Image (spheres, rainbow, N blue to C red):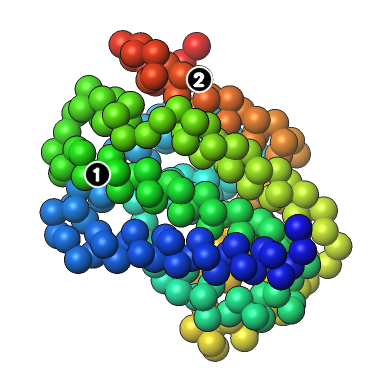
Amino acid sequence: MRKEQLVQTLEEQLRTVKAERQSAMRDPALLAARTALKRFQSARLAASHADLLAAPDSGDAALFFLDELYGANDLGRRDADLERIIPTLQRMLPLAALQAITEAIVLDALSERLDMAMARALGERFDQAGYLAAYRATAAPAERERQLALVQALGESLCALVKVPFLSATLGVMRGPARLAGLGELQRFLERGFGAFKKMRQAGRFVDTIVGRERRVMHNIYAGAADPFAPD
């Protein structure tokens, strides 16, 4: 995919995720439900992947996935940074880096839509049984499978990104101008993802492990397993 196509996709997905988040901001009850859901999911993911979080080799990458892709943190500032600097990113970053950013936002937009549907069904207070029922009722398996495919694609792009020559230097050069321009959140996101994957010896295996576990959880939930989060 060419840079122009990536930029078009990036702009479209940023508008989508912005609209979802703004709808929650206008509705305090929905915002509280969305926050409760994201905290539940973040805690569950931390438990399911505790070994990856604890391992020196993969701990930073696991935290990156939990905080930046599945966490309860507000990512609105990062997305606003992206909207402001898309032309600069298109000019300065190599294709592989722009692709990774675009894939992250495509994943974010889909995850936000799925989460908002669940939040509307659940409300602020729910238990695991309610969560599982809402998971099955608000999204078809194909949508969840697409979410996992996007996680896999993003992980593979990050694995490839660390092999791009001079990217570390490019990110370093961008650091000062980014801070001066008020783009610190975006710069932090880029450097954190790049740094976490660069330090891993087997980044591909890390991605396959996360996706494989989450696919098993997904299948267990739709199959009605009593404890779908239990390890094999």
Q: What secondary structure is marked by label 2?
A: helix
- Point out which mark residue 229 bears: none
Single out the mark in the foreground, 2 or 1.
1
Which comes sooner in the sequence, label 2 or label 1?
1
Secondary structure at badge 1 equals helix
Which amino acid lies under the numbered mark 2 shown in the image of this protein? Arg
Q: Residue at x 53, y 87 (%)?
A: 181
Quadrant holding the N terminus: bottom right
Give whichever of 38, 24 is nearer the camera. 24
Q: Position of residue 164 (x, y in %)?
A: 82, 59
Provide residue 218's location: percent of width, then percent of height.
45, 24
Rendered location of residue 162, percent (x, y): 76, 54
In the rendered image, which quarter is residue 172 located in?
Answer: bottom right
Name the spot of residue 53 as percent of width and height, x first. 51, 37
Which sits in the foreground, 99 or 63? 99
Q: Is residue 150 visible?
A: yes
Q: Residues within 10 Å of mark 2 (few under 14, many from 20)?
A: some
Q: Seen in the image, is 212 located left or right of residue 75?
A: right
Q: Residues within 10 Å of mark 1 (few under 14, many from 20)?
A: many
> Which residue position is annotated with label 2?
216
The reply, left or right, for residue 218 in relation to residue 194 is left
Viewer-proximal residue among 208 and 51: 208
Q: Is residue 8 above or below residue 175?
A: above
How many discs appear? Answer: 2
Q: Residue at x 19, y 66 (%)?
A: 26
* Residue 119: mark in rendering: 1
Q: Is residue 146 above or below residue 103?
A: above
133 lies above or below 168 = above
- Can the viewer see residue 38 in this picture? no
Q: Is residue 179 left or right of residue 205?
A: left
Inspect the image, locate mark 1, and give the three-letter code of the amino acid beneath it.
Answer: Ala
Residue in view at x 75 percent, y 39 percent: 201
